[in-house]
Image (cartoon, rainbow, N blue to C red):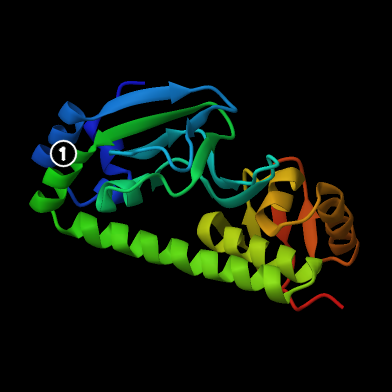
Amino acid sequence: MKMKRDHLKTIPLFSELTNAELDLILEKAREQRYPRGSIVFYEGDPGDFLMVVLTGKVKVVLLGEGGQEIILAMLGPGNFFGEMAILEAAPRSATVMTAEQSEFLILEQPSFSALIELHPSISQKILKHLSERLRQADEQIRSLAMFDIYGRIAQCLLRLGQTQGKRVDGTLIISDRPSFQELSHMIGCSRETVSRAMKVLQEDGYLSVTRKEITIMRPWHHHK
């Protein structure tokens, strides 16, 4: 796809820019497409560019020596990543891979820095974004340490619901839902454990699960 100014303005990071500043991005940025299952970059790689998801979905992961994954975040269109390496001129802090075919807008460090100087509100948005990610990481650590499997699933689903869900008639619907395998990597257990626990939660009326959606049916109290 060829990026247009109107599309660029729908991306939250750029929504307050003037037309001239949007045109600067269109002039300086490039677009790149990756097939499903591609490594965008590895943790530890050098990085001097920011990436915005235009289409598709990526997962931000930490990889163990044995190949195991811990998923830190799932990011869809409008989200961005790679800002930490640009801001502190440091190696990438995590590995990013595509969960489906995805297309990105890539903004190199010099253009990104110039843009922040022209429009300081962009840096405020990035700081807010970093703060949200830090809070999510804190919740993830606390969940792994304190809760049983039901509590960890609850924490994970409520977090997903708050960031990418919608409320409909007292329920919370998570569209384009993560797979049980992806959920298991988010909460640190086996796919089979997640599958069994989700089945219990569906039978008890907490959840409804379809191929595309997870619906939280009623206010969640810790599972007994």
Image position, residue 19 (x, y; %): 12, 39
69 lies above or below 142: above
Q: Residue furthest front?
A: 65
- Split into 4 quadrants, where in the image is the N terminus? top left
**Residue ID at (59%, 60%):** 161
**Residue ID at (41%, 37%):** 45
Query: Based on the displayed image, in which of its 4 quarters is residue 9 positioned?
Result: top left
Q: Which residue is mark 1?
A: 110
Q: Residues within 10 Å of mark 1 (few under 14, many from 20)?
A: few
Viewer-nearest residue: 62 or 123? 62
15 lies above or below 139: above
Viewer-nearest residue: 128 or 43? 43
Viewer-nearest residue: 45 or 221? 45
Type of amino acid under label 1: Pro
Residue 18 visible, this orientation = no
Q: Is residue 162 left or right of residue 48?
A: right
Image position, residue 212 (x, y; %): 70, 41
- Split into 4 quadrants, where in the image is the C terminus? bottom right
Residue 221 visible, this orientation = yes
Viewer-nearest residue: 105 or 43? 43
76 lies above or below 169: above
